[in-house]
Amino acid sequence: MKGKNLVVIKYGGSLMDAKSVEKKIIKNIKKFAKKNPVIVVPGGGKEITNALKKSKIETKFVHGLRYTDGKSIKIVEKVLENIQDKVVKKLKNALAIKKAVIGERVKKLGYVGKFTSAKFLEIGKVLKKSKIAVVSPVGKNKTGQILNFNADEVAGGIAAQVKAKRLIFFTDVPGVLDKNKKTIPIIKIGNIKKLIDRKIITGGMLPKIMSCVQAVKKGVGEVDILDTNMKGTKIL
């Protein structure tokens, strides 16, 4: 699968709460799909947290990544695949690919996977039928164990492997914010360690930024962290 014209979009789960916000994101995705094939990777952090809470399972994070135990993985799988189906229905001209992500288990995070590849042949076939492929961040390792993957890593990993035209992370904030809560318009990857050390890049923004770094290094054309109004931070 060639990535020359491909746009990869991470659709943050926090953006699915308000209908007005969701409407903007869906509109933006459809706009991209008019000119380019698009892969959408929907997140679902908030819905997973709520589902775990109902099952009386405590949510735990390690360096911005969710710890997923044996009981949690079944809930995570169900929640993320339900979200995937909802996104497909909203986009209309889209198709879902189940368990398209492949990786290695990160034991210190329980049943969490480190992205190594994706079923690009299947994704390519879907993109020929539809302009949009929706890939859930639920996947497997080589032995078939179901794993929970960070959606940011999946989006970044796919974009990097195919050298996509553009990688976009849609979030609930206008990009990376400085200590005064103002958007940093451009960040060069050589300055990222400094921003992490100064605690400007923390928590859930960490996996996004690290995915951006890999994408830039692997030759992705353009990498952005944006809000619903297409304002945010460009990573160079």
Image (spheres, grey):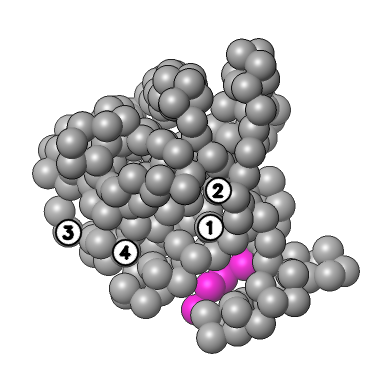
Residue at image x 40%, y 58%? 156
Tell which circle, 2 or 1, labels the residue nearer the N-terminal end. Answer: 2
Q: Name the residue under label 4.
A: 160
- Among numbered discs 1 and 4, the one appearing first in the sequence: 4
Q: Are marks 4 and 2 in contact (CB under 8 Å)?
A: no
Residue with the mark numbered 1: 207
x and y percentages locating residue 142 in the rendered image: 18, 41
Q: Earlier in the sequence, mark 3 or mark 1?
A: 3
- Quadrant of the rendered image containing residue 56: top right
Percent position of residue 100, x then y: 25, 37
Viewer-proximal residue among 125 and 140: 140
Whole-angstrom CA distance, mark 2 to mark 1, is: 8 Å
Q: Tell me the CA gap for discs 3 and 4.
A: 11 Å
The furthest residue to the front: 108
Contact between labelled residues 1 and 2, with CB atoms less than 8 Å apart: yes
**Observer able to see residue 184:** yes
